[in-house]
Image (cartoon, rainbow, N blue to C red):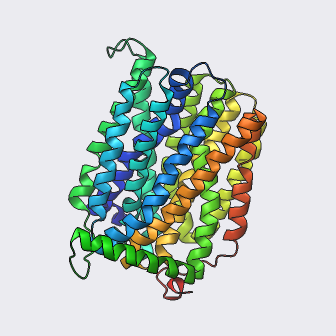
Amino acid sequence: MKDLFRKDILAWALYDWANSAYATVAVAVFFPLMFSNYWFAGSENSTTPLGIANSVTSMLIVLLAPVLGAIADRGGMKKRFLLVFAVIGVVFVSSLIFIEQGDWILALSVYALAGVGFSGANIFYDALLVDISPRKKLDIVSAFGFASGYLGGGLALVIAIVLTSFPQFFGFGSAQQAMLASFVVVALWWALFSIPLLMHVRESRIHREVSFGQAVTEGVEQLLATFREVRRLKIVWLFLLAYWFYIDGVFTIIRMAMDYGVRLEFDQMSLIKAFLIVQFIGFPAAVVYGKLGERLGAKTGIMIAIAAYIGVTIYGYSMANVMEFYVLAIVVGLVQGGIQSLSRSFYARIIPASKSAEFFGFYNIMGKFAAILGPLLVAVVSGISGDPRLALLSIIVLFAIGGVILSFVNEPEAGSIEARTD
């Protein structure tokens, strides 16, 4: 555990603390609330346009991720690309404060661009894992990053809740004005806690320095070679396919859960409390899951989480009151960070370390392309049936397919040559 307190690992984990304010306060809680009650007020079905917006965001990342990852590896520019996308995210999430009531198209557009910044930066943040962690510690270091994110996101949400609960005390005319100001709080939090990574995390040396233009040319060429290599590496290809499906379900639940609670007419503050439960349970649970990955294997830990999510989806279909929503929040908090951290560490173990950003570009493609299908699936089912419960139940197929494919992936021993060539 002492390795976790190295300066570079702490700085790397603090970036998860930083950008989780956006994932928690903006994506999971306040944007869905403001969209349903302020920008898209008066309509019964906010699920469809919100789902489409999330899908469009993911599509943009799908197009950008592999090329940018290849360029970053060739030019040693992971941190520089992370900075560029983080700035995009910070600028656009703070811009939400200026959007007038009823202007839902502009709100969704700005939200989508902030999401591009968030997801784009994460490509290079994930890729830096192999630069700061020993291979035998990938599970616990990855889990430490997610745990930091849960704690940071939870604390940022507490600040936002205080602002919206006592708006007059802080000089706001209403709770809605305070919610809008919370997007600025998110931006400041994200920017401030990104600084340690930029200062203290060092990328592994590349064999030779190249110009940006040369990095672009060689990066695109290398991208095509990497795609062929990914197809050749059976264990990598099978894992990515499994990940594509099951992480789709995870991201869809994260992005659409608040809207689901709103459509079931649960009390707004009760819904926010449920998300706080997820954050603060997720903090220790992610660390425990990292140790579980070391003892039982990352694959076993992922399969346990998939089973839990299937149970959550079935239970959520028949949910009737807020107390049941709290139960779901507890279960999700126990496994959400675990399934993401073990997936990242498993993947980091089976790819060539020298091509980490490039391979993590493909990793993010599978996650983001899946995140196109999930929200779109929910949007279509909700639009056709008008039933948010049926829309939630449709997610179960994603976890089931992902679990079945993952069962065919043989987990390698950490650092083995076979793990990277089979």
Q: Please name whichever residue, 42 or 347, is drawn nearer the observer in this view of the structure.
A: 42
Q: Residue at x 41, y 43 (%)?
A: 113
Q: Left or right: 84 with respect to 256? A: left
As drawn, 259 above or below 87: above
The image shows residue 61, relative to residue 363, as above or below, that is above
Percent x, y for residue 48? Answer: 63, 36
Q: Residue at x 27, y 69 (%)?
A: 203
Q: Is residue 28 visible?
A: yes
Residue 165 visible in the snapshot: no
Quarter that holds the N terminus: bottom left
In x, y percent, where is residue 213? Answer: 25, 70
Q: Position of residue 53 (x, y in %)?
A: 54, 41
Which percent across, then down, holds residue 63?
47, 59
Q: Quarter of the image containing the C terminus?
A: bottom right
Residue at 63% over, 22% down: 43
The residue drawn where x is 28% and y is 72% is 215
